[in-house]
Amino acid sequence: MANVVLGVTGSIAAYRAADLARELMRGGCTVRVCLTPAAEKFVTRVLFESLTGQPCLVWAFDEPEAGRMAHIDWARQADLLVIAPATANILNKIASGVADDMLSTIALAYTGPMLVAPAMNPAMLANETTQASLRRLVSRGVEVVQPAEGEVACGEHGQGKLASVSEIASAAMALIGWTRRLEGRRVLVTSGPTREPIDSVRFLSNRSSGKMGAALAKAALWMGADVTVVTGPAAVPPPLGPKVVRVETALEMLAAASREAPTADLILAVAAVADYRAAEQHPGKMRRTEEDLVLRLVPNPDVVAELGRLAKPDAVLVGFAAEPTDDLAAARAKLERKGLHFIAANDVSQAGIGFESDENELVLIGREGSPERSGRLSKIGCAKWLLDRVAQALPGERETP
C-alpha cells in the first residue's frame, strides 16, 4: 500500500481535492493531507481527517505525534507527494526552495517523486516566473498534470482550470506503479570522471560532471531499488539514499565496483573512466624546465567489460558512449566488444547536452530491435526514460501498461 501526501493549496478548486483523496484511497493508497493556511479558507482540516482517517496538517509546527517533527516524518514516509490544486504561489516557492509553511517545508524535505496539478488564472499560469518555475520543477523530475482550458473562477477563459480528478488520480497511480518497478532489485551505478595522477598536484581527467550518473541513481531510488553508487570526483553530489563509494582513479573504481557487481541485478556504467594513466607517478611536484616533456601512458583496465565478467548471468549491463558525432557505429561496436545488453549513446558535440549540462539526448541501442531516441530532456528525464526501457529486460519483468 502506497503512502501519499496530498498537498492542497489556496485555490477555489481546493474542494475537488476531497474527491481526489477518495480516488487515491480507492486505488489502495493511504492518504494524508496537508493544507496551506490559504487552502483552509476553502476547505477544512475536519473534512480531510474524516475522509481519510488520518491526521491533517496545516501549520508549520503541527505535531500529530508529540515530540515528532511532522514535516520530516511525512516527507520520509511518503511514497508520493501530490499537490493538487497547485497555485502559482506554491509552485514558485518549491521551485525556489522556500519553506515558510508546512506544505512547502514537507516539499523541501521530501526526496521522492512528486506530482503537481496547477490551477490558477490563465495570466498567472502564463507569467514568465510561473513558467520558469514549472520548467525548473520538470528538470528535477516533477510530473505536471497540465491544467485544462476553460472558464476559470474569475470568469476569464483560458488554460488554468484544474485537470479532472480522474486524470490526476490516473497520473498519480501510474507514478506509484512506476515507483515499484525496481523493488527488490540491486542497482550499481558508476558515475563521474576518474583522475589519473601525474604527480602530487597534477592529473589526467575529463569533462564528465557526474550529473547523468546522479540522475540515474535518483531515478532508480524512486523506482524502489537498492542503489550503490561508485563515483569519481564529480561536480555534483550523488542523491541522498544510496550507498556511496568515492574513488579517484580507474583502478580504484574497478576495485570498488567489482565488490558490488556480483550481487547487482542492473549495472549502469555511466562513469567516464580514463582509458590511460601515467606509467610513472612523479614523486612530489614536477618543476617546469625549458626541455620538452614526454609523458608515457599505459592503458587502464576496461572497467565495464570486467564488471560484465563479474556480473550474475541474469544481470543487465548498460554502458554509455559519449561520441563527437551522431554516428552510432562506434557505440554499436562498443556494445558488442564489451558484452553489453544496452548502450546509451549521446552526441556531445551538440550545444547544451552531454558533458556539464543539465540536459541530454540519448539513443538507446540494444542487442535486438531498432535504436530508440529519448529526445532532448532534462538528465533526470533521460534517466527515467532509460530505466523504463532497460527494466523490461530484467528477469521476471513485464512492460508496464
Image: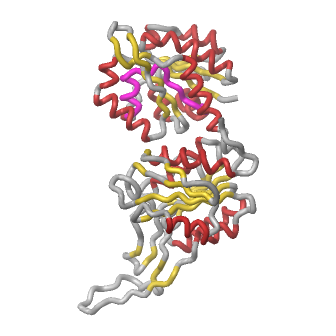
Is residue 212 rendered to the left or right of residue 227? left
Q: Residue at x 66, y 14 (%)?
A: 53
Across and down, in percent, residue 205 comes to 41, 71
Is residue 11 rendered to the left or right of residue 316? left
Which region shows up in magenta? 78-95
Across and down, in percent, residue 202 comes to 37, 76
Asked if 23 appears above or below 184 in the picture, the reply is above
Of residues 33 and 390, which is closer to you in this image? 390
Asked if 83 appears above or below 194 in the picture, the reply is above
Which residue is farthest left? 290
Colour setting = secondary structure
Question: Does 93 appear in magenta?
Answer: yes
Q: Residue at x 41, y 85 (%)?
A: 282
The answer to which quarter of the image holds residue 259 is: bottom right
- Taking the image as drawn, is residue 230 in sight? no
Which residue is farthest bottom? 291
Which residue is farthest front? 370
Q: Residue at x 56, y 71 (%)?
A: 252
Quarter containing the N terminus: top right
Across and down, in percent, residue 93 comes to 38, 29
